[in-house]
């Protein structure tokens, strides 16, 4: 069983990174060792999990199905480990959590008091950082990322995802009309959120209604007004400057007050995934395992994230 788990974790790293070399660096193994483990796993299962070329590694259909089941199994094992880790120790001490600005302000900030009320012995530092690859040299206990960094030595757990919706002020729509389809945005002003890592604004992405998982409709950012702070983007939209995107929970009080109204409500963004990552030291500090479990609970079905 231990050997099977080792092979599954190696497979999960290759599937997650799309690279034998990157997975090898993350696992502290040679590329040949990783390749050998994958070959052994494929032989054990009697199926081919990856399509390999000289430049790319891609999951086969069987590999995709296996990857989904492996991730659920590993998530359950990590959940079990974390649950008993924080049951067996005092949940207290300093805890540094590093998250992207948007996730910190929109998803986590309002929920963190709940964790701190449960665990009054924890002193938390919330660090907002949009440079997603800066992990190795950052002294944080838990990271939240929208993608898994290519080369890391951390354990991780998929938390869930979030979607963006579009809104504008009634004044803006009265002056410019209401777009009905993403292609209509070419005739509108958008307030764009800057990707601080690249210094460029994010393009707008929309999932076709009724066709989840299909290739999104992409609308290039216009760049008329770009902000690296989500509150600033919304303030500009409330002032009537243009269209803005954010999560439903952020817009709800603005919809209730009439400051903003939904636009193209059936056209949501694709689901953007979130992962928790933490250092694999043994044993896991109870405050770390407790916080990872808390994060996972925020995204449980039926609970708004």
Image (spheres, helix red, strand yellow):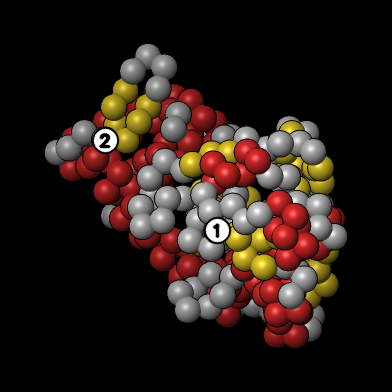
Res. 97 image quadrant: bottom right
Observer-side mark, 2 or 1, equals: 1
| In the displayed structure image, the side of residue 270 where residue 130 appears, left or right | right
Which of 103/98 is in front?
A: 103
Which of 21/177 is in front?
A: 177
Q: Crowdedness of circle 1 by 10 Å Cα count: few (<14), some, many (20+)?
A: some
| Residue at 75% over, 85% down | 117
Rendered position, 89 above or below 241: below
Question: Which of the marked residues, 2 or 1, is nearer the chain's N terminus?
Answer: 2
| Residue at 41% over, 65% down | 76
The answer to whether residue 31 is seen in the rendering is yes
Which of 241/146 is in front?
A: 241
Image coords of residue 120 (percent x, y):
78, 83
The answer to whether residue 103 is seen in the rendering is no
Image coords of residue 293 (percent x, y):
57, 71
- Quick one: quadrant of the N terminus? bottom left
Instruction: Please give the residue where the numbered disc 1 appears in the rendered image.
Output: 264
Rendered position, 173 above or below 184: below
| In the displayed structure image, the side of residue 105 where residue 150 appears, left or right | left
Image coords of residue 193 (percent x, y):
74, 46
Instruction: Please give the residue where the numbered disc 2 appears in the rendered image.
Output: 60
């Amino acid at each position: 069983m231990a050997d099977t788990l080792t092979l599954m974790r190696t497979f999960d790293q290759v599937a997650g990174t799309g690279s034998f070399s990157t997975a090898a660096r993350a696992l502290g193994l040679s590329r040949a060792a990783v390749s050998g483990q994958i070959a052994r796993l494929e032989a054990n299962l009697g199926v081919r999990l990856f399509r390999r070329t000289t430049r790319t590694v891609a999951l086969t259909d069987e590999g995709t199905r296996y990857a989904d089941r492996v991730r659920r199994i590993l998530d359950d094992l990590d959940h079990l480990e974390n649950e008993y880790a924080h049951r067996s120790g005092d949940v207290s001490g300093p805890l540094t959590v590093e998250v992207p600005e948007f996730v910190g302000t929109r998803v986590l900030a309002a929920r963190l008091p709940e964790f701190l009320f449960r665990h009054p012995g924890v002193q938390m530092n919330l660090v907002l950082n949009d440079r997603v690859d800066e992990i190795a040299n950052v002294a944080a206990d838990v990271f939240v990322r929208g993608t898994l960094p290519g080369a890391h030595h951390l354990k991780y757990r998929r938390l869930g995802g979030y979607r963006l919706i579009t809104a504008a002020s009634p004044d803006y729509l009265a002056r410019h009309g209401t777009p009905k389809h993403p292609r209509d945005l070419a005739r509108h002003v958008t307030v764009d959120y800057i990707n601080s890592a690249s210094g460029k604004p994010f393009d707008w992405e929309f999932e076709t209604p009724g066709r989840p998982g299909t290739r999104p409709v992409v609308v290039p950012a216009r760049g008329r007004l770009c902000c690296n702070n989500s509150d600033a983007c919304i303030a500009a939209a409330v002032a009537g400057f243009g269209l803005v995107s954010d999560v439903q929970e952020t817009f709800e009080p603005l919809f209730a007050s009439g400051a903003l109204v939904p636009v193209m409500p059936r056209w949501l963004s694709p689901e953007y995934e979130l992962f928790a990552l933490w250092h694999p030291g043994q044993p896991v500090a109870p405050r770390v395992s407790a916080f990872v479990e808390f994060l996972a609970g925020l995204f449980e079905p039926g609970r708004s994230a």
